[in-house]
Every structure is written in structure tokens, then in C-alpha cells.
Image: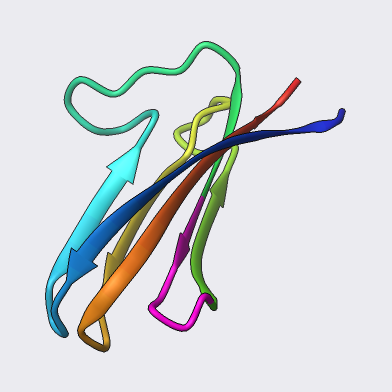
Amino acid sequence: AEHVAGVTIPIELHAGEWIAAGTCGLEGARHGGDTVLRFRDPEGAEVSYSDDACGSLGSRISYRATRDGPHQLVLACYG
């Protein structure tokens, strides 16, 4: 399947803060396709990745920031 570009959401985090994001496994989360989540640190390095989580085609990540700064949550899908 071909990877389809999605959205990038900027998130400001401080060292020690946690983030949880997903299209499954969290209250109110839902997906209508095969989603992929990537989380990037302030330098742009991928520090968390999820595909096919929750026994489905959804995605779910949790991450504890190791440094202050603007992180990025990238949501995409296969289609």
C-alpha cells in the first residue's frame, strides 16, 4: 500500500512531560483507515512510532520528553 501524507502537529514539551496520542486505545480515539503515528524530538529525530496498534489498523504512542522544545506529532495513513 502507498503511504499518504498526513498532518504534522507541533507540540511544545518540557523534559519529563509525557504525551499519549492515538487513533485507538484512548478515550475518544477513532480511525477510519490504516493510520501511522510518528513523534519527533526538537532535532527532528523520530523517537516514537506506531502502526497497527490495539489489534487493529489504528496507532497509539506514549512518550516522555527528554528535552525541552518543539516536538512534532505526525499522523499519516496508508491508502
User: Per the image, is 40 magenta?
Assistant: yes
Residue at image location 18% in from the left, 71% down from the top: 13
x and y, in percent, of residue 50 in the image: 53, 50
Residue at image location 41% in from the left, 76% down from the top: 41
Quadrant hosting residue 30: top left
Drawn side of residue 20 relative to residue 15, left or right: right
The quadrant of the rendering that contains the C terminus is top right
Total marks in image? 0
Quadrant hosting residue 36: top right
78 versus 14 height, above or below: above
x and y, in percent, of residue 46 in the image: 54, 71
Residue at image location 37% in from the left, 29% down from the top: 24
Give the color scheme: rainbow, by chain, secondary structure or one colour. Answer: rainbow
23 versus 66 height, above or below: above
Span highlighted in magenta in the image: 38-44
x and y, in percent, of residue 60 in the image: 40, 43
Quadrant hosting residue 22: top left
Q: Which residue is most to the top? A: 32
x and y, in percent, of residue 35 in the image: 57, 31
Instruction: State the residue in front, 31 or 41.
Output: 41
31 versus 71 height, above or below: above
Drawn side of residue 14 relative to residue 1, left or right: left
Q: Which residue is most to the right? A: 1
Residue at image location 50% in from the left, 29% down from the top: 58
The quadrant of the rendering that contains the N terminus is top right
